[in-house]
Image (cartoon, grey):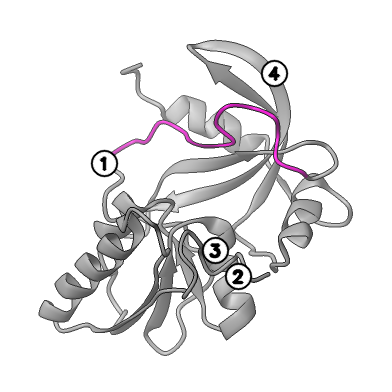
Amino acid sequence: DKRDPREFLRKISSELVKIGGNDPVMNYLSRRGVGISQAIRLHPRMKYYEDKKIIGIFPAMIAPVINPSGKAITMHATYLTPEGNKASVDCVKKLMPATEKITGSAIRLAAPVNGHIALAEGIETALAVTERFSEPCWSCVNATILESFAVPDGITSVTIYGDNDSTFTGQKAAYSLAYRLHKAGIAVMVKIPDQIDSDWADGL
């Protein structure tokens, strides 16, 4: 709906706990073969809605979406089972209502190193990039937001780890962003996995 989401986001934020031990988020990330991020939290009992009706309550992996100026504007949820598998729901991953336009934003999973940051679509893919290539990597959630990414102050070089989609959606987003960043004077490189319909997390 069109109500101001701040109260809802504050409530969700107050219910988050740090990840650790044998919790659902840690088990989920371990199964995916990736490391963790200090930006990620666990919501022990997250309501899942379809058509504005609550159809279940699940543990959820929660990560803040940050705009180019460094302000958190919403959160991303991945619904899980208590054992750390993806929940059996129609839409496992959802964005909560945002306080402003989400274009240009990212989930900042790691601090930039020497003015450099890597970008990927999903959280798991970004964590896999860091695991495989030791590069600090942010998640832009999906191809649309990746293509709109706005470089924050202090970032001078970017590596884009795009998805290899049979529809060319991921490649288009990666190279469109690269073209725009290059024109703006940002050093940029694009890397796409060889296998069709794969991303950089699939090898793990």
Q: Earlier in the sequence, mark 3 or mark 4?
A: 4
Q: Residue at x 85, y 42 (%)?
A: 83
Q: Residues within 10 Å of mark 1 (few under 14, many from 20)?
A: few
**From mark 3 to mark 4, how far is it between C-alphas?**
27 Å
Write down the residue under mark 3: 125
In x, y percent, where is residue 111?
Answer: 50, 75
Res. 80 in view = yes
Nearest-to-viewer mark from 2 and 1: 2
Answer with left or right where residue 17 lies relative to residue 173: right
Write down the residue under mark 2: 128
For the residues labelled 2 and 1, say whether their Cβ atoms are less than 8 Å apart.
no
Q: Which quadrant of the structure image shows residue 200?
A: bottom right
Nearest-to-viewer mark from 4 and 1: 4
Q: Residue at x 71, y 60 (%)?
A: 32
Q: Which quadrant of the structure image shows residue 190?
A: bottom left
Q: Earlier in the sequence, mark 1 or mark 3?
A: 1
In the rendered structure, find residue 56 and report the number of the disc placed on it. 4
Q: Secondary structure at mark 1?
A: loop
Please provide the residue range marked out in magenta.
85-101
**From mark 4 to mark 2, how far is it between C-alphas?**
30 Å
In the rendered structure, find residue 101 and report the number of the disc placed on it. 1
Q: Secondary structure at mark 4?
A: strand
